[in-house]
Image (cartoon, grey):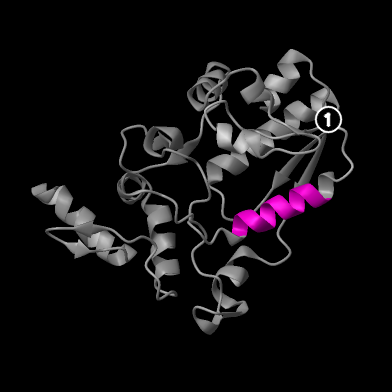
Amino acid sequence: MVLYILETGMPLDEVLFYDTGMEFDAIYNNRDRLKKILDRHGVKFTGLKPENPFLYDMLERPVTSKQKGFHLGYGWCGGTCRWGTTWKITALDKYAAGAVRHYVGIAADEPERVEKLEGPKTAPLADAGMVEADCLSFCRQRGWDWMELSPATESGFVDLYDILDRVSCWCCCNKNLKELRNIYHYLPQYWERLLQLQDRMERPMKKYKNKKYGEYGNLRRLGEIFATEEKGGRT
């Protein structure tokens, strides 16, 4: 979206980046690259962070809920419990309050999100009729990628958009089975981090059912399934 705004000459005074602390390395690399471009255009860059460290809210924050009573941490972020998303939107809206125009990076194939935009918020990509695939192609044509170290490829790198449907936080529990399988195979460094988080929570990251394996939402159980698939047992 920022590249599109700069190329088309739309007014842009400041770019906000909300850092959860749980982004892929590729996101931080692209952030740093973009900051240099913004400097050349005289556009201010501002980084925002959550009030508490992400892992504190996830694992240690004292919480009392009707469903579970008293417990520590909100647990996995995603699904119907997108507490991290709530923190992000709240922080961005608070900082941008009073802005004449507030750009949001929503594509044309997300009409339900576009319809929810209010006040000064606008979606220039959707207004231009660009769907998500168009946006990815637009960036790649200009030399942008989302490369991560990967011991599973000959080059030693893999583009996140080649193995994930969406490049959200690496610990987002909205990831589907295909995406988790690809993290296991291509990004073992992130898979190990996910296992460390799973070991500190009772709730499985995901919940899948399979006639052969039953329920296997716990990531350590999922790893066993993926290892079996590698040996020819893929179902």
Q: Quadrant of residue 117?
A: top right
Residue closest to the eye, 71 or 27 = 71
Left or right of 57? Residue 100 is: right
Q: Is residue 207 magenta?
A: no
Residue closest to the eye, 65 or 166 = 65
Location of residue 151 with respect to 130 vertically, above or below: below
Left or right of 33? Residue 110 is: left
Query: At 55% from the left edge and 71% from the top edge, which residue is drawn?
Result: 74
- Counting from the top left corner in percent of width and height, residue 122 is at 73, 30
Is there any visible trace of residue 156 in the rendered image?
A: no
Label 1: which secondary element: loop
Query: At 85% from the left edge and 30% from the top edge, which residue is drawn?
Result: 13
Location of residue 69 with respect to 224 vertically, above or below: below
- Counting from the top left corner in percent of width and height, residue 33 is at 66, 32
Query: At 68% from the left edge and 53% from the top edge, which residue is drawn?
Result: 88
- Counting from the top left corner in percent of width and height, residue 75 is at 51, 69
Left or right of 42? Residue 192 is: left
Location of residue 119 with respect to 108 vertically, above or below: below
| Range of residues picked out in magenta | 84-94
In the rendered view of the protein, which quadrant contains the N terminus?
top right
- Counting from the top left corner in percent of width and height, residue 133 is at 48, 24
Q: Which residue is mark 1?
A: 43
Query: At 66% from the left edge and 40% from the top edge, which residue is drawn?
Result: 116
Q: Quadrant of residue 57?
A: bottom right
Is there any visible trace of residue 195 in the rendered image?
A: yes
Amino acid on which the number 1 mark rests in the picture: Val
